[in-house]
Image (cartoon, rainbow, N blue to C red):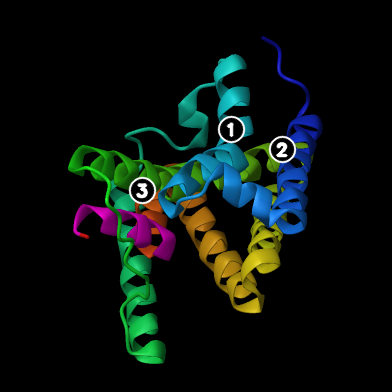
């Protein structure tokens, strides 16, 4: 299958996100009826950020290595990503008195169901979300092909837009935190040509991951 040009791919992806964002803001009650339990939010996350990029990649028969799924640069990717996690945790501890803040998700689900939903949440809000970001950065860069600053421009635009997306639901703090975090992880991806480290880093830094993972010990 021949993929549409990068501008069309990126536009379709952002349009999909904007439509879902408007739906969630205008009709949160309907969204709650569809996903009545917190552990079901993983499905919404998959639809929200993972669906379009994954479909484009699969049906376009693109190499996953284009988006950093490779052993090349893996060691550097892991080391620098974990250094960033350590620095971030230290900042959280210094500024808030906690390493990371998240609630505990209590549920009467059976143990197998808890394990399944916990790992689904870890996947959706961790690696999949970072893949979504890397995919957008790479495809946006293709739009600016020929410019020496194409990657930096695409990374900056995507990080800010993704921060604004969180601003809609979580306010200015999320805008700043998400934009800076994803910008730095995007730089690590670019430098190492590997996205596995940033995926692990974001999984460890995302409070929503810890919230859903708490099903394992609640």
* Mark 2 → mark 1, Cα distance in angstroms: 9 Å
Are the residues at dot 2 and dot 1 in contact (C-beta closer than 8 Å)? no
Q: Main secondary structure of the magenta part?
A: helix
Question: Residue 148: horizontal and vertical position, in percent?
Answer: 72, 49
Q: CA distance from mark 3 to mark 2?
A: 22 Å
Q: Badge 1: how crowded within 10 Å, few (<14), some, or many (20+)?
A: some
The local secondary structure at tag 2 comes to helix
3D distance between C-alphas at marks 1 and 3: 16 Å
The answer to whether marks 3 and 2 mark residues whose Cβ atoms lie closer than 8 Å is no
Residue 117 placed where, x, y %? Answer: 34, 43
Q: What is the quadrant of the N terminus in the image?
A: top right
Instruction: Write the start and end of the magenta stretch as one range.
Output: 206-217
Mark 3 Cα within 10 Å, few/some/many (few <14, many 20+)?
A: many
Residue sitting at 45 percent across and 45 percent down?
A: 40
Q: Which mark is residue 51?
A: 1
196 in magenta: no
Residue 27 to residue 119: above or below: below
Q: Tally the marks.
A: 3
Residue underneath mark 2: 13
Callout 1 secondary element: helix
Query: Circle 3 — which element?
Result: helix
Labels 1 and 3: the sequence-earlier one:
1
- Nearer the camera: disc 3 or disc 2: 3
- Residue under label 3, please give it: 122
The 10 Å Cα crowd at callout 2, few under 14, some 14 to 19, many 20 or more, is: many
Res. 145 in view: no
Dot placed on the residue nearer the N-terminal end, 3 or 2: 2
Q: Is residue 18 visible?
A: yes
């Amino acid at each position: 299958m021949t993929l549409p040009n990068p501008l069309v791919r990126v536009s379709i992806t952002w349009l999909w996100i904007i439509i879902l964002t408007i739906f969630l803001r205008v009709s949160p009650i309907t969204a709650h009826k569809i996903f009545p339990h917190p552990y079901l939010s993983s499905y919404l996350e998959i639809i929200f950020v993972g669906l379009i990029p994954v479909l484009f990649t699969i049906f376009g028969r693109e190499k996953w290595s284009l988006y950093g799924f490779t052993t090349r640069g893996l060691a550097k990717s892991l080391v620098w990503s974990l250094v960033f996690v350590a620095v971030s945790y230290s900042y959280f501890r210094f500024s808030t008195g906690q390493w990371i803040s998240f609630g505990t998700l209590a549920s009467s689900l059976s143990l197998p169901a808890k394990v399944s939903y916990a790992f689904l949440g870890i996947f959706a809000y961790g690696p999949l979300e970072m893949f979504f970001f890397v995919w957008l950065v790479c495809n946006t860069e293709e739009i600016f092909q020929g410019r020496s600053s194409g990657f930096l421009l695409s990374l900056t635009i995507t990080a800010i837009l993704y921060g604004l997306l969180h601003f809609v639901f979580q306010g200015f703090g999320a805008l700043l935190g998400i934009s800076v975090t994803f910008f730095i992880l995007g730089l690590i991806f670019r430098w190492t040509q590997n996205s596995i480290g940033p995926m692990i880093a974001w999984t460890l830094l995302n409070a929503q991951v810890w919230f859903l993972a708490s099903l394992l010990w609640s």
